[in-house]
Amino acid sequence: MKAMNYFFMLLMLVASISFTSCGDDEVEQVIETSIVGEWFNESETQSITYTFNSTLTGNYLEINFDDYGEETTRTSENFEYSLSENSNGEKFVTIVFENSNRRMQYELTSTKLLLYTSSTVYLEFKRRK
């Protein structure tokens, strides 16, 4: 009879451990990442920097280099921008320059900004500040 009691207690112990939940009870922390800041993309022949200010204004800077690494051209232009999101959760930035507009889909992490120039082609920018 004692053996049966120990067996029953062992069975209850195993059952209580089996029904213990883990993992899903934790609340995930949502981190909001902002596009505000300075973002750069550099190659051997070109450097592009977008600076997005919290006032929905910014600056575009493009520097081109020759084969020897010497600066050949520099273009800088101020802009205004707006952010939007469609019903599929895709995010867009509309950049309004003095003579043109650009609407690009973007993806954002705390250190990386992807600006899509088409549905499959994008430029990867890194956060400078």
Image (tube, rainbow, N blue to C red):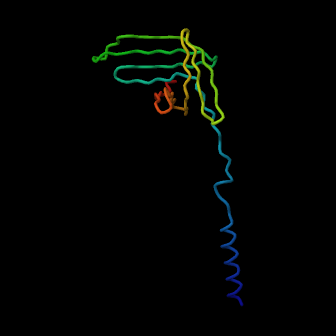
Q: What residue is rendered at 63% in x and 36% in y?
A: 88
Return the residue found at the far top: 98
Residue 116: image location, x then y, percent: 50, 28
Q: Quadrant of residue 71?
A: top left
Q: Name the residue at 48% across, 33% down.
A: 120
Residue 110: quarter of image: top right
Above-or-below relation of 38 to 119: above
In front: 9, or 31?
A: 31
Q: Position of residue 13 (x, y in %)?
A: 68, 73
Number of disc labels: 0
The answer to whether 55 is drawn above or below residue 12 in the figure is: above
Q: Residue furthest front?
A: 119
Q: Residue at the location (70% across, 87% down)?
A: 4
Q: Position of residue 123 (x, y in %)?
A: 46, 28
Is residue 55 found left or right of 107 in the rendered image? right
Which residue is most to the bottom?
1
At 68% from the left and 83% from the top, the residue drawn is 6
Instruction: Classify the position of the N terminus by image quarter.
Output: bottom right
Residue 41 drawn at (x, y percent): 44, 24
